[in-house]
């Protein structure tokens, strides 16, 4: 509660002195443990700000809404460490200018919410490096271990089962801050790379391609997972890919706003044990 | 019995400067190899998108082979380095989702390695033959042909 | 509506013996969109080609597939035939059923089945082929040669003698480079200056060559045929339009004790100076770091002595912008800083010198007028020890590569010394004698057999001074014993390394370099004189250590590449290039980073009032080489590659 009150005051101050034109945060949602985004432009709106451990959504995707940042005025945003990494990636991929973003960082343990020091992404680099160096914080869940132990056939069956439920609503894409393309590959029909009808083959292709496009970019904020109406454990695939680029290329997505995208760069001595 | 022997269908995506030329060399050297592979020629391994691999599977391939120039030999200086990263990630992804890495293989074959090409095609064909048809994927393909169930 | 012609070639028996061509033709004839499906013994023959052309005309075909040998064999032939029949040549595809089918399979049924798959997939591909036109890029017929050493001079002269304009940029006050510093050259022992200076003069006087000395390339933009180059003319403080090179200013200059770079510190020069007597242009520059006026604000002796009013202390750097069609990079090398070998005492003992310093001692125009004299006391050394690979082939302290020229110049030094100091003794410590080259091994043998150079196979561990002598401790690995040689002078065969600013310069002009900073060729074997950037060529030791004949050969090769480029008004290129869909491009610039050719630029999209709406990727057709790396990177599927489009490949795979 203290954190929430302090941030309410800060936002009001920054809005009043013109340092930011808007702050993006959380407000109460339709049920007690749901939160919805809040776009704060006035002092009154700031009073609706809620900041507690249920504020899970990574809000950074709202920043790339067309036109929001084009006046070069600063926008404040409430972010967990994963969200801060998203800002770095969006900056590295030239979707926004990181200097335009004022970060209200927070994190939570249990029900406790605490603020994170810093306002500009640069000030969080120590924190992000620590997270990278201590991968234990990214705990593999039991389901993950279960899949690792399966053989190929069992895994295929597992995912076939999961993907068969997919209704291709693309909520995962809409919720993801990284899915900022003006046209998604799934909407490209010349050629129609991905089968759009809702059969498992098409679902399989869609989810594989989505995971591939997020490889080296996903920060495991969990937006897609929470958005999925049929509860496909999308986080598992994304987590697996994040581990892959970390182990293979020492790439931890979103460490800095100038980080080279892992799949658009290479090292001559990259691993190639798998190549015949 | 042998009439019913499973003949794997394998699709290969190769770059034109190295592996395609290596395959041509196998031909001009009259080396003999298994007839199960169909080659798709591209300018560079850098052009080989993961989508191609998925489409080959959709077309009923039991195995996919991707091949290009050895590191350092790329006609386009480093298309193959980019490809290598992409493959490594994509391969892990397929593995995690149950498409065994044994079905999607990668190799470097230079324009001079006609015999490596022939040997590789033979060994890949045998490996896939041992794995058997990719029934699980074919089941998915079959579903798409039937009307959607309610 | 597609009307595809399928032409199945028997190639005599080569295809027909394994593939049932009649069955193949019949199957293709029934494939949707195929208007003609015929077989013939030899389609590449004249009547074969005529029949293809006739079929194209008679049936108004929209595309053809030739099922025959490898496209690497006859794609060009059949594309030409298409063009002659009025069909765009890029609407022709080859189904390779010989090298990759009939020749490699034994089972006839399986081979026929495979041939069908191959041909069908090409039919599906060709249905989606687009009409393409070769890309034409205008060419500015003016070459820029960077570096006025022997490689740069050769390239400039070759291009200019063929009648094309050349701009030659040299950052030092004079042309000449390292070759001008050498005494005699191996393996003929002809005087370096005697063969070098006429070339320098010829270059300076050539009507087609614009010579810019004391100048540096500031930036390079654009692409092959159309570079925009900015040159910084460093201020000489001497007005070149007035100066006649009389040398009065040099005589009067009171700052006389400045170590001469050209003489590798063995000689002295003034603050206003020409690097050497035969400098081209023979006009001095003021070294502001040493000039008394620039340091204290008083002196101006040179200005007072100049009767032509050529000295101008107010001079500023100037910039020249040039339009250039092709660039030859001939920026040369430098020698490694020998201070890394503390145990050899370079810098500590004045009589431990580098090979290049020895060249200056042996040079008739050098500080000792060609006499071999010790720097310490000016006495003639009676025992000289040469240490080869002082830096080369030494991963721990020096560089891993072989500097290539040291074996030869050390043998030459031993010979020159023997010729100049009768009765002098030479010892050469070596790892291997690498004397591959015309007349080279004979040359080293002569050094051993006629000039009595004593070669000791082994490394030197330490050089120290004792009673005014240099003690050289090494090992003779052939005898398996340590040896100590008493010497009056020690000459180190230092490694050739890239210029200290080589990497920075490469980034500036957009070419690739290796771990050391030597410039990368486009292909080590097949394209050794092209850089990774189209229209930029490499000559001389900036690419790798080279001797004079190699540098000159490569320089002439770059000249021929430049001249081939200039032989046409427009550059014609295969239209296999990437294209971007600006409407869907998300501007993430992954493609910009991934492109091996820096061919992708950021393009501003503005509305009618000029307001910037967004930035998108733009593929420069002059630079794109058509690898397609960007296409498979592009998440939004905005990029595509002409000739191998997403639609074509999709259809090809689905046709299998």
Image (cartoon, rainbow, N blue to C red):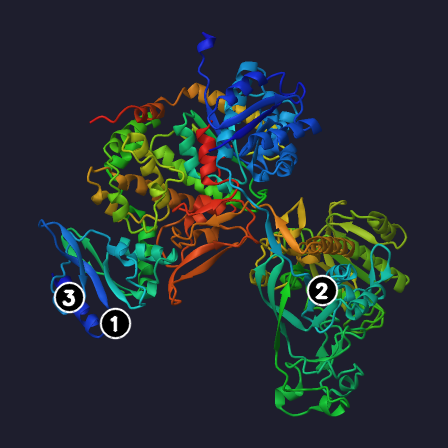
Secondary-structure class at tag 1: loop
Q: Nearer the viewer, mark 2 or mark 3?
A: 2
Instruction: State whether residue A117 appears in this view.
Output: no
Mark 2 burial class by Cα count in 10 Å: few <14, some 14-19, many 20+? many
Indicate left or right for C359 with A170 as reference: right
In the rendering, at what x and y percent does residue C146 appear? Answer: 67, 64
Q: Position of residue B41 (x, y in %)?
A: 53, 34
Q: CA distance from mark 1 to mark 2?
A: 56 Å
Tell me: residue C30, above or below residue A20: above
Question: Along the line of sight, which residue is nearer the eye, C565 or C508?
Answer: C565
Q: Is residue A38 above or below residue C351?
A: above
| Residue indicated by mark 1 | A19
Q: Marks 2/3: CA distance?
A: 68 Å
Q: Name the residue carrying label 3.
A: A8
Q: Label 1: how many residues lie within 10 Å, few (<14), some (14-19) or many (20+)?
A: some
Give me the chain letter of mark 2: C
Q: Give left or right: position of C284 versus C106.
A: right
Q: Secondary structure at mark 3?
A: helix
For mark 2, give the secondary structure. Answer: strand
Residue C166 numbered tag: 2
């Amino acid at each position: 509660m203290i954190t929430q009150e302090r941030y309410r005051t800060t936002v009001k101050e920054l809005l009043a002195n013109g340092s930011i034109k808007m702050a993006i945060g959380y407000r109460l949602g339709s049920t007690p443990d749901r939160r919805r985004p809040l776009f704060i432009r006035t002092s009154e709106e700031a009073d609706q700000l809620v900041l507690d451990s249920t504020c899970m959504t990574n809000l950074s995707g709202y920043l790339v809404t067309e036109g929001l940042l084009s006046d070069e005025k600063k926008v404040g945003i409430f972010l967990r460490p994963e969200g801060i990494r998203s800002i770095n990636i969006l900056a590295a991929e030239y979707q926004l200018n990181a200097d335009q973003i004022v970060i209200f960082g927070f994190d939570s343990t249990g029900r406790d919410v605490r603020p994170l020091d810093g306002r500009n992404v640069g000030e969080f680099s120590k924190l992000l490096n620590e997270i990278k160096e201590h991968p234990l914080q990214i705990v593999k869940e039991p389901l993950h271990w279960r899949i690792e132990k399966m053989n190929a056939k069992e895994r295929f069956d597992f995912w076939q089962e999961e993907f068969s439920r997919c209704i291709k609503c693309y909520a995962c894409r809409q919720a993801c801050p990284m899915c900022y393309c003006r046209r998604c590959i799934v909407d490209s029909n010349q050629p129609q790379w991905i089968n759009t009808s809702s059969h498992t083959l098409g679902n399989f292709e869609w989810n594989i391609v989505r995971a591939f496009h997020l490889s080296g970019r996903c920060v495991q904020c969990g937006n897609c997972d929470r958005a999925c109406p049929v509860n496909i454990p999308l986080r598992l695939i994304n987590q697996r890919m994040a581990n892959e680029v970390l182990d293979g290329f020492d790439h931890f997505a979103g460490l800095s706003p100038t980080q080279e995208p892992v799949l658009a760069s290479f090292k001559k001595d990259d691993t190639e044990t798998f190549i015949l | 019995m042998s009439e019913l022997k499973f003949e794997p269908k394998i699709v290969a995506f190769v770059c034109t400067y190295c592996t395609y030329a290596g395959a041509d060399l196998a031909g001009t050297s009259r080396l003999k190899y298994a007839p199960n592979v169909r080659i798709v020629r591209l300018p560079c391994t850098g052009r080989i998108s993961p989508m191609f691999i998925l489409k080959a599977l959709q077309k009923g391939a039991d195995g996919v082979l991707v091949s290009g120039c050895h590191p350092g030999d790329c006609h386009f200086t480093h298309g193959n380095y980019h490809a290598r990263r992409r493959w490594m990630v994509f391969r892990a992804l397929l593995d995690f989702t149950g498409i065994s890495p044994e079905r999607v293989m990668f190799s470097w074959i230079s324009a001079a390695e006609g015999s490596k090409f022939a040997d590789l095609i033979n060994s890949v064909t045998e490996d896939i033959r041992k794995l058997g048809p990719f029934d699980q994927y074919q089941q998915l393909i079959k579903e798409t042909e039937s009307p959607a169930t309610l | 509506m597609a009307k595809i012609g399928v032409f199945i070639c028997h190639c005599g028996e080569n295809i027909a013996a394994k593939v049932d061509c009649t069955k193949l033709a019949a199957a293709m004839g029934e494939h949707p969109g195929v208007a003609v499906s015929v077989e013939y013994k030899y389609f590449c023959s004249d009547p074969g080609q005529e029949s293809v052309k006739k079929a194209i005309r008679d049936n108004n075909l929209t595309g053809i597939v030739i099922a025959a040998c490898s496209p690497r064999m006859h794609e060009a032939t059949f594309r030409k035939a298409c063009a002659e029949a009025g069909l765009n040549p890029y609407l022709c595809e080859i189904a390779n059923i010989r090298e990759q089918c009939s020749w490699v399979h034994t089972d006839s049924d399986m081979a026929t089945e495979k041939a069908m798959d191959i041909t069908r997939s090409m039919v599906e591909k060709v249905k989606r082929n687009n009409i393409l036109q070769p890309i034409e890029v205008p060419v500015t017929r003016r070459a820029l040669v960077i570096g006025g050493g022997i490689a740069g001079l050769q390239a400039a002269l070759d291009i200019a003698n063929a009648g094309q304009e050349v701009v030659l940029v040299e950052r030092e006050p004079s042309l000449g480079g390292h070759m001008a510093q050498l005494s005699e050259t191996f393996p003929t022992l002809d005087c370096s200056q005697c063969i070098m200076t006429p070339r320098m003069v010829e270059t300076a006087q050539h009507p087609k060559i614009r010579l810019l000395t004391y100048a540096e390339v500031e930036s390079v933009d654009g692409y092959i045929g159309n570079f925009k180059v900015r040159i910084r003319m460093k201020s000489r403080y001497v007005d070149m339009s007035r100066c006649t090179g009389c040398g009065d200013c040099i005589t009067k200059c009171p700052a006389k004790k400045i170590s001469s770079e050209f003489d590798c510190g063995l000689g002295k020069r003034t603050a206003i100076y020409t690097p050497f007597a035969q400098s081209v242009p023979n006009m001095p520059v003021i070294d502001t770091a040493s000039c008394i006026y620039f340091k204290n604000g008083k002196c101006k002796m040179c200005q007072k002595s100049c009767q032509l009013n050529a000295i101008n202390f107010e001079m500023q750097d100037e910039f020249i912008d040039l339009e250039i069609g092709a660039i030859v990079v001939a920026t040369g090398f430098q020698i490694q800083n020998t201070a890394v070998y503390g145990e050899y005492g370079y810098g500590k003992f004045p009589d431990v010198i580098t090979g290049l310093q020895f060249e200056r001692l042996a040079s008739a125009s050098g500080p000792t007028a060609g006499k071999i004299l010790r720097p310490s006391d000016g006495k003639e050394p009676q025992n000289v020890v040469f240490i080869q690979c002082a830096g080369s082939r030494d991963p721990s302290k020096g560089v891993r590569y072989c500097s290539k020229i040291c074996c030869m110049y050390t043998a030459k030094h031993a010979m020159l010394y023997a010729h100049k100091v009768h009765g002098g003794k030479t010892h050469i410590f070596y790892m291997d004698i690498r004397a591959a080259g015309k007349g080279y091994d004979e040359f080293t043998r002569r050094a051993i057999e006629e000039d009595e150079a004593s070669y000791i196979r082994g490394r030197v561990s330490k050089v120290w001074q004792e009673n005014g002598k240099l003690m050289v401790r090494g090992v003779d690995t052939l005898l398996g014993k340590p040896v100590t040689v008493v010497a009056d002078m020690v000459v180190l065969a230092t490694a050739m390394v890239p210029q200290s600013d080589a990497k920075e310069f490469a980034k500036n002009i957009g070419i690739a370099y290796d771990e050391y900073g030597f410039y990368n060729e486009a292909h080590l074997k097949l394209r050794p004189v092209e850089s990774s950037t189209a229209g930029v060529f490499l000559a001389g030791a900036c690419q790798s250590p080279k001797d004079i004949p190699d540098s000159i050969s490569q320089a002439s090769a770059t000249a021929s590449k430049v001249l081939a480029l200039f032989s046409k008004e427009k550059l014609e290129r295969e239209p296999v290039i990437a294209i971007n869909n600006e409407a869907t491009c998300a501007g993430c610039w992954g493609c910009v980073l991934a492109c091996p050719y820096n061919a992708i630029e950021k393009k501003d999209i503005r509305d009618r009032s000029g307001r910037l709406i967004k930035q998108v990727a733009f593929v420069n057709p002059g630079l794109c080489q058509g690898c397609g790396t960007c296409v498979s990177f592009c998440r939004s599927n905005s990029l595509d590659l002409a000739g191998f489009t997403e639609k074509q490949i999709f259809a090809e795979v689905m046709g299998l």
